[in-house]
Structures are given as structure tokens and as C-alpha cells.
Image (spheres, rainbow, N blue to C red):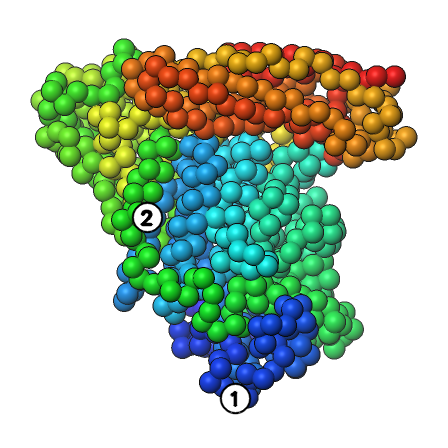
Amino acid sequence: MSCNNKSLLIGNKVVVILVFFLCLVHSSESLRPLFACDPANGLTRTLRFCRVNVPIHVRVQDLIGRLTLQEKIRNLVNNAAAVPRLGIGGYEWWSEALHGVSDVGPGSKFGGAFPGATSFPQVITTAASFNQSLWEEIGRVVSDEARAMYNGGVAGLTYWSPNVNILRDPRWGRGQETPGEDPIVAAKYAASYVRGLQGTAAGNRLKVAACCKHYTAYDLDNWNGVDRFHFNAKVTQQDLEDTYNVPFKSCVYEGKVASVMCSYNQVNGKPTCADENLLKNTIRGQWRLNGYIVSDCDSVDVFFNQQHYTSTPEEAAAASIKAGLDLDCGPFLAIFTEGAVKKGLLTENDINLALANTLTVQMRLGMFDGNLGPYANLGPRDVCSLAHKHLALEAAHQGIVLLKNSGRSLPLSLRRHRTVAVIGPNSDVTETMIGNYAGKACAYTTPLQGISRYARTLHQAGCAGVACKGNQGFAAAEAAAREADATVLVMGLDQSIEAETRDRTGLLLPGYQQDLVTRVAQASRGPVILVLMSGGPIDVTFAKNDPRVAAIIWAGYPGQAGGAAIGNIIFGAANPGGKLPMTWYPQDYVAKVPMTVMAMRASGNYPGRTYRFYKGPVVFPFGFGLSYTTFTHSLAKSPLAQLSVSLSNLNSANAILNSTSHSIKVSHTNCNSFPKMPLHVEVSNTGEYDGTHTVFVFAEPPKNGIKGLGVNKQLIAFEKVHVMAGAKQTVRVDVDACKHLGVVDEYGKRRIPMGEHKLHIGDLKHTILVQPQL
């Protein structure tokens, strides 16, 4: 949302005056007091909502009772208006912290004592680490910097991050913002990052308030004439339950997130921000959200003006609030809610309920307590600190994925590879490395700079940008490759190819990039390393099969220290341990799959999506990634081979074994009676380098007749472990029958199939027989 030339078309009238006023209020945000209830304000210090020893819910009700209807309405939008008579300043709710404090939203600004913030790798890259403790630690550091900037008067405390949508389609421009294609990985990432952001303070207090977005089934921006503002995602209950909603449920259940954002699109004909079942019944009812629900920016305006979901703007305002929306990013509710009340479409109590949710979050943040609490002393020294910069580098090390290493060409030798040609449109980039929804980085190390720390470099861009529309620079690039002891090609994508509002049409490298790689590889007298920067997968089958391309590295968008990490990995100062969080499909896959088809499961000529349902050829599979060392798995102890489910363990007659599907409903099962099945996986490092390894545990359910199941296998657990060369580490994974062996039927109900469940741990397989005890 922008205040520049902003207007709302209502019928044949353009409403600009109030919007101008709203933007005028927003422009003075920097003058707002940091905290309400200033002790120096004799008018408010004795009011009940200002008393820190009073329970928060009582303080909130006291404050709501003092507000006029107009004051309440002006606090239903992101640039909430001040209430000077109560000592309450205006507040901008919209800030972003996807992988570092960002200035994308108007709530945070850089400059003065805060020229930048630590910019970590883009989420898709960090997800490739499969390291839950790293995800949480990044969240903790980001919230340290956010609190410091808030204390300095240049940022808010409500951050609309993370993006936990599923990377359903490889062309999606915003796939880079997500943790990838697997719902369990996305769920674990969501909970970990949210815990890091919000802190673990006692008494329901918040360090900052996170927000999981975009709920739900949102993963199309602008493809083939269909945009997110007009897209109706047709989704089965089965896919909602076992794919699209999984990360959001985890955000609320496990992460205790303070906010959820509804999306632009419709789901099965209804705008998500006006869907009572999705918002009030599911997020707040079933999942018990302790926080507020916010719209994506201008979503209410979108479903009125572009989707034409209601006849009048007042009906749109009423529909969103009654559905459970608490806060509108945009001015729509500030303009039309009072009219909705006057027409009897809403009551003032409906508004009170929405306000109670937002004000409670502000109270939990301490915004009505004065400059007190454990974060009051954070300041400029806590932003871009050496420790934070080091964590950004370590995150890049852990997220970069080695995809090919023929003849152990990597790492390069300091003795043999003294001159390195560094070629490609991404070889000396800065902002490209931090992807979208980024702020101003503390400092950058480009790939060229990172490699230059180890060798003399010969630099040629080869192309003018990633579009690579001509071959004018190819000859100079070939000449550099002929002269060097080794060649590093840094190719791929950037925000001009994949971004918000910009989905890709194909999976190949743009323009003449493939030709540049092939010609340089032919010319090079030393090993050729192809480094790819991208959020989404790229079909590089040509390079995978080209013996002259010795190694392929996927760096994602590796953050401010990305170039240093690339150099360290190429020369062996760091051992790559990242694994792909998404499937890399061949180009012909997208010809068979329209982005508008939301179905996950294969059917007829439709091949299905993600490793869970797609069985066709891939360039690189989900979870793939090499190391400079080698690892083997073994089961350290004999795991359970059989699980008998006694009907006496079931707490409802409805859960009795279904004779058609041979399964038991999880919802009617006393899951506490099922024994946990510990797997003790011994990981041996049989190579010459210390390294980190991800232990994946997949479950393959029995093929016993549950209609529409269609699952190849599904990830149920993953653990990151560091193993010294020649050493062993044992990883324990507890398999829970209800949580891990359940599948979702066509009605969206979870069931435990009877029969043989196969667990896959690397190249190991273990079978567990689940059967009823009659």
C-alpha cells in the first residue's frame, strides 16, 4: 500500500479526501511518543488501562470503554490514529521482518543511528539448512534488532512475517519467501521463527508480534493473465487439511503466533478475508489464536472493487469484521465501517471485539507500560553487531546446497587454483543476494569479493544482467576462462525474473545464460563450477549432464554475507550441508501443469505436485544435497516392528475400524495410549572432512484403499547433526502413530491406516505393522 495518489473507486465516485487525511496522519508517525501512559501525563497516569498491575484483559476493556465510535473505527486500520486526550499516539502496524528488519512496510525506517540491519539469507535458503535451532536463533537476532530500532523511534513492534505458504508450483515468484514445498518443514520453520521473534517471556508477554501469512492456499501472483486479486483457488478439504493449512496451524498451536494474515485470493468462491469458517471458526475457534487477524494490504478493497463480492462497501466492511478480521491493512474500514453500523450491518460490539484483539497484543508488547521491561536497553550497538554478522554468514554456509561434484573437483586447492575466472551476471551483485522483503544490509560481500580472498580473480560479467539478452560479453568471458586455473560461473535469477506480482513462465535459465555456461565450460582450462542464485528451481539438466561442468552449487539468495559463504565453500573453509527444500522439475513439467490447478494429487494426465504426490522425472529431488564427506546410517537399536491398536483404546464408537478403508479416525482415537516408537539412527562420517548432515525420516503408508490418498511418502521428522570425520553420532526420532502415521482422507479427516507402514531413513527401510487388536 502506498499513500502516493491513492484513491478508492466506489461506484462512479472517487473518495480521496479521507484517504488524504489518513496519509497525512501516517506522515507524522515519526513524531509519535514511543509509549502510551506516559507517567508525565497527569491526565492518564491514573487511568485503569495504564496500571501495569491490572490484568491485561481488564485494561483492554477499560480502554475500549473510553473510546468513541469514531476513535474505535480509526484504530481498525494499519496506520491507527492517535487519541491525544488519552495520551495514545498513532501507531503504524505494518512492519516486515522476513529475514531481517525491512523497510518495505511504512512502520520501519533506516537512517541516522540505524543505517541498516542484518540481512540474513532469503527464507528458501535458510530452510535448506533444515536446522530448527538456526531458524529460531535468526528470529531472536531479528527481534533484538527490531526492539532496538523501536527504542530508537524508527520501527514498530508488529512484524508481518513469516510467509509460510507452500511452494506448490516452481514458477511462483514468491516461492523464495517460503520454507519450500513440504508442509511439515514449513510448519517447523513457522513455529521456530515465530518463537525466535516473539521471545519466551513469562506471563504472555511479547518481544515483538509475529504474523503468519498468507492464509490460505495463496501461491499465485500473476501468471498467464490470472492475478492474485482475481484468483479463486479451488481446493479440496483433503488438500487444505494435509497441505495448505498445516503451517498456519503450527504457527498458532506450536509457535503461539500473535497474528495471522488473510490473503487476496478466494478459496472455493469466498474471499479469505470474508470467510467466517476460515477466520472465526478455524483460526480463532479450532486453533485458539491468541492475537489478531489482519488483511493483506487492501484485501477488503480488493474483494469489493475487483472481486465484486458484495454490492456495497459497507457490506464489505461488515462481511470482513463479522468473519473475524480485526485489522485492515489499508483505509477501507476507516472509511466505511461507520456507515455499516448506521445501516445495521454491524454493531459497535462487533468493533469492540476486533479492537480487543489488537489492543491486547499492544498491551502484551508493553506499549502501554512505559519504557520498561527486559528489552528497554537495546539500541544501535545491538544492530549489525559482529555476532549478528557472523550468524548471517553461518546461515549462508548451512543453506547453500552442493548439487554436483564430479571427481571431487571441489573444494578447490589454494596451491593448484591460484587464478580463478569469476564470470556471470550474478558474480558481483549485492542486493540480488538478499532477495525480496529485505531491508538495508549492514554490508555486503559479493561472490567476486568472497572468491578474491582465496585467489587472484579475473572478472567478466558475460551478460548485461540476468536477462542476458545478448552474447556481446561472451568472448571476454571465454578468454578469462582460458587464462584461469579454475572458473566460477555465477548465474541464475533475480527480482526482475521472480518476485511478488511476477511469476515465471518456465524453468530454464533466462536469455542466453545457458549458452554462456556452455561456451565458457568449453573454453576453460580448469574445473568449472556453476553457482546458481535463485529462489525457485531451475532446470539445469544441460549442466548436470555436461562433463565439463565439474560442480553445481545452489546458493539461493544467500544474504549479505553470501559471497563470503560461496568463497568459503568453494575453497573448503566450509563444508556444504544444505538440502533442497523443493523439487527441481524439468522444463516440460510446467507444460503439463497450469498454475491455477491447486490439486496436489496426481490424476489422469495431471502429474501431481511436490515429492509427496509427483512420480515423474526430476532434475534434483527434494532433500538432495552433497557434502565433501560421506555419511552412512544404521539403526543403533532394534525399533518396534508392530503396533497393535486395541479397540478398548478408542474413546468413541465412531472410531471403530472402517471396513472399507481399513483405517481408524485420529480424531476419535485416544492417542495418549499409543506408545512412542523411538528410532535410534547412528550417523557415521566415513569421509575426511567434518560435516553436518540432515537425517530425514519419511513414512510411506500402506496402499489399503483409502480413497484419493495418492501419497508416495511424506516427511515426518528431520534432525540436523554435526559429525567429525571418522566419528559417529546417534540421533533419536520418536515416531508418534497419531501424528506421523496418519493420512488425510477425501473428506479432510485424518486416519491411521492399518497395515505395513514403511519408514525411510536414507537408504534404510524399516517396516511397522499397524493392526487392530479385536
What amino acid is labelled 1 in the image? Answer: Gly
At horizontal 65% and vertical 69% (from top left) the residue drawn is: 55
Residue 335 vs residue 761, the one in the foreground: 761
**Which label sits on residue 42?**
1
Q: Quadrant of residue 57?
A: bottom right
639 left or right of 650 in image? left
At horizontal 54% and vertical 13% (from top left) the residue drawn is: 635
Identify the residue under disc 2.
388
180 left or right of 144 in image? right
| Residue 214, x across and y down, in percent | 57, 48
Residue 497 vs residue 483, the one in the foreground: 483
The answer for how far apart the CA atoms under marks 1 and 2 are is 41 Å
| Residue 409, x across and y down, in percent | 24, 16
Q: Quadrant of residue 126?
A: top left
Q: Quadrant of residue 580?
A: top left
Q: Residues within 10 Å of mark 1 (few under 14, many from 20)?
A: few
509 left or right of 662 in image? left
Give the SS element for disc 1. loop
- Residue 178: in sight, yes or no? yes
Vertical comparison of 27 with 698: above or below: below
At horizontal 67% and vertical 77% (from top left) the residue drawn is: 62
| Residue 511, x across and y down, in percent | 32, 32
Q: Quadrant of the C terminus?
A: top right
At horizontal 56% and vertical 49% (from top left) the residue drawn is: 212
What amino acid is labelled 2 in the image? Answer: His
- Residue 592: in sight, yes or no? no
| Residue 747, x across and y down, in percent | 77, 33
Give the SS element for disc 2. helix
Vertical comparison of 213 with 237: above or below: below
Q: Residue furthest right?
A: 653
